[in-house]
Amino acid sequence: MNACVSVRSWIGSIIFAFYYMVSTILFGVLAPFATVLLPKNYRQPVLNLHNKGLLFVFRVFCGVKVEIIGLEYINKDRPVVLVANHQSEWETYVLQVLMAPVSTVLKKELLSVPFFGWGLRMVQPIAIDRSQRTNALKQIISQGKERLDDGRSVLIFPEGTRIAPNKEQAFNKGAAMLATSAGVPILPVVHNAGYTWPGKKWRKYPGSIRVVIGPIIESEGKKTSALHDEMDVWMRAEMAKLPKGNDFLF
């Protein structure tokens, strides 16, 4: 990394961290009032103001270019089980914006984080206890079907946790089980955001993010294992094609 890139990385990361803190506190304070006062259909658009702001500041001040392929596969009139690889926080924000309304499967501890967790509660996530795998799966199926019946897509990260770029972990079958149980399709997504927004690190890096969406994988007439394998094959193949490392702009 040359000196110019390094300086841009540090300055952009500091600006982003400050904006992230202020925006999260503001929306966290407003979230309980919004949950009570706003109709359900208006809550995610309000929270997405926060998400869009974060994505904008990250892109502009951290020097990140985003390329999204496959937008034509998004149909907001048809709820889906949305699956994506999990490398950073970036994909959780961008998918909330692209697929709204969407309910995310996440670990229940996040709801207890001051400000951040208060905002999350606005959009009815499916908060699971990962230490109770059997109960967590039942919860994903039951609450996931409720969200889908209500017209909301359900976002699942089948790796179960953040995985660094160039690392692999088996996908769990929760997404396929929910899709076959609810009779809805899977919409797969892959990306390489972990190079510019590394998981669990505050420093961000200039570069390029590529997102590949779809196509839809229908669940009708398929067993869970067959649907899971179809999803797994597509995601692995597309992940292998993604650029490795930062395509630095400076």
Image (tube, rainbow, N blue to C red):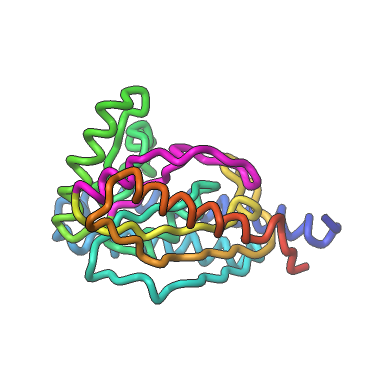
Magenta residues, start to end: 154-181
**Residue 239 on the magenta span:** no
How many marks can you see? 0
**Is residue 121 in view from this perspective?**
no
Q: Magenta segment, principal secondary structure? A: loop
The x and y percentages for residue 178 are: 26, 46
> Split into 4 quadrants, where in the image is the C terminus?
bottom right
The x and y percentages for residue 212 are: 51, 65
Q: Residue at x 22, y 33 (%)?
A: 138
Q: Quadrant of residue 60?
A: bottom right
Up-down relation of residue 190 to residue 199 (above or below):
below
Using residue 150 as the reference point, say whether residue 5 is left or right of it.
Answer: right
Using residue 15 as the reference point, say whether residue 104 is left or right of it.
Answer: left
Q: Residue at x 56, y 71 (%)?
A: 67
**Is residue 136 in view from this perspective?**
yes
Looking at this view, is 227 or 43 the one in front? 227
Q: Which residue sits furthest top?
A: 131
The x and y percentages for residue 221 are: 23, 55
**Residue 163 on the magenta span:** yes
Using residue 166 as the reference point, say whether residue 237 is left or right of it.
Answer: left
Looking at this view, is 218 or 96 the one in front? 218
Q: Residue at x 40, y 76 (%)?
A: 72
Q: Quadrant of residue 127?
A: top left
Q: Quadrant of residue 73?
A: bottom left
> Split into 4 quadrants, where in the image is the N terminus?
bottom right
The x and y percentages for residue 227 are: 34, 51
Q: Which residue sits furthest right?
A: 2
Q: Residue at x 50, y 62 (%)?
A: 55
